[in-house]
Amino acid sequence: HPLFAIETSFTNNDNNVDNDIHTEFDIGVCNIPGVDWQRPSKVNQDWAFINHQSLVNDDDGDDDDGNDGNDYGRSKKMYTVIGVLDGHGKYGHELSSFAAKNMPCEISNQFTSATSSSSSLDELPEPILEFERQTIQKSGGFNCDEYKSTTTRTQRALINAFHAVHYNAIHDTKVKAGRNGATCIVCHIDHESKECTVAYVGDSRAIRFSAGDADDDDDADDDDGNDGIEVIAEEHTVSLPAERIRIENGEGTLRGQNVFYGPIGIAMTRALGDAVMVRAGVIPTPAVGKFQLHQGDVLVLATDGIWDVLGNERVRDIIVTLERRQQQQQQQKQQQRRRKDKGKKKKDE
C-alpha cells in the first residue's frame, strides 16, 4: 500500500561478501490503513522492515548454544531479520518509524561486535548498561542481568538491540518518546541452521503453522487442540500473570486492562518508547524464544488491526486457501503448457 512504510536493507561487515542473498523462503508484506471518520487526519502508524545480513565471524570459540564455533568461526553467516511494528499515542508513528530504521542496524552491531576479539556479544555502551541496571531494575523489580543469563547469544543480541533502540529514541529530541511508543516483533532467521529467534514487546502477535498441516482439517489438531498453530509472540497485557505482577510491583496502577501512571494509560505492559511509563512497570525488554523452521512452515507477524477481528485459525485458513488456489493455478498452467507442447509435436510430425 502506498501509505505503508517498509524498510528493506542489506548489511554486511566484510567488503568481500557478495551482496546477492538468495533465501529459501518468501516474505510478503501487506497493510491497509484504517479509517477513523472522527479523525480524518489519522496517521498510519504501522511499519515493517526486512534486513538481509551477511556477517563474517572470526572467533573460533564455542557459543552458549553449544555450537562448536559454527556460529562464530571464520565463516560467512547469512541472516534475515524481519520486523513488524505498531505505534501508539499521537506521535506513535515517530517511534515505529525510528525503530524500523534503527533496529536492523543495532542487531547487526551486536553480531559484528561478537566477531571482534576485543568485544563480546553482551557489550553495550555504558549509558545503556546503566539504564538497564537502574531504570529497568526499578521497574517492578525486573532483574535484567538475571533475565539475560537464561538466554542464548542470539536472544541476548536481540534484547540488547531493543534496549539500544529504546534508549536512543528517548534521547533523540526529534522523537517524541515520552508519551508515545510502539509494539515490535522481530524474527531473526539463520539461513544455515534454519533456526528462528523471536523477540517481542507490545500487543502485536505472531503465529506459526505448517501449510501442510491444514490439508486435512481432521488431522490438524495437535495434543493441545490448537489446530497445529503455535503462538510464537503473544500480546503483553495485564492478562498475563507475570506481567500483572510486575506492574503491581511498580509505581503504576491498574484500571481494567490498562496500565496507568498518573493520568497516562496504555493497554500493554511492554513497549519501545513510552518513557514515562517505565516506572509503572512498562519495560522495553522483549520476551524471547527460538524454534526450528521446517519445510512448509508459515510465520504470520501482525498488529492488532488483524488480531482484533481475525482469530488464529481464520488467518491460517485464509493463507492456506490462497496457497492452494495458487498451486492449482500453477498446475493448470503446467497442464496447458504440456497440451500445447504435445499438440505442437503432433503438428511437427
Image (cartoon, helix red, strand yellow):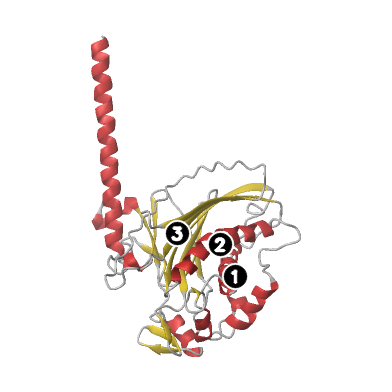
User: To which quarter of the image does residue 42 belong?
Assistant: bottom left
Indicate the amino acid at tag 1: Asn
Q: Position of residue 56 (x, y in %)?
A: 66, 49
Residue wearing tag 2: 102
Name which residue lies at 30% across and 53% down.
319
Residue wearing tag 1: 168
Residue 142: give its label. none
Check if mark 1's residue and mark 3's residue have beta carbons within 8 Å: no
259 or 205: which is nearer to us?
259
160 or 221: which is nearer to us?
160
Q: Is residue 334 left or right of residue 198?
A: left
Check if mark 1's residue and mark 2's residue have beta carbons within 8 Å: yes
Q: Does label 2 or label 3 sit earlier along the sequence? A: 3
Indicate the amino acid at tag 3: Ala
Using a 10 Å C-alpha cutoff, classify the residue at mark 2 as few (fewer than 14 neighbours), some (14 to 19) or many (20 or more).
some
Q: Secondary structure at mark 1?
A: helix
- The residue furthest right is 118
Residue 279, visible in the rendered structure: yes
Q: CA distance from mark 1 to mark 2?
A: 9 Å
Q: Secondary structure at mark 2?
A: helix
Q: Position of residue 349 (x, y in %)?
A: 26, 9
Q: Does label 1 or label 3 sit earlier along the sequence? A: 3
141 or 252: which is nearer to us?
252
Q: CA distance from mark 2 to mark 3?
A: 12 Å
Residue 48: give its label. 3
Indicate the amino acid at tag 2: Asn
Q: Does label 1 or label 2 sit earlier along the sequence? A: 2
317 or 254: which is nearer to us?
254
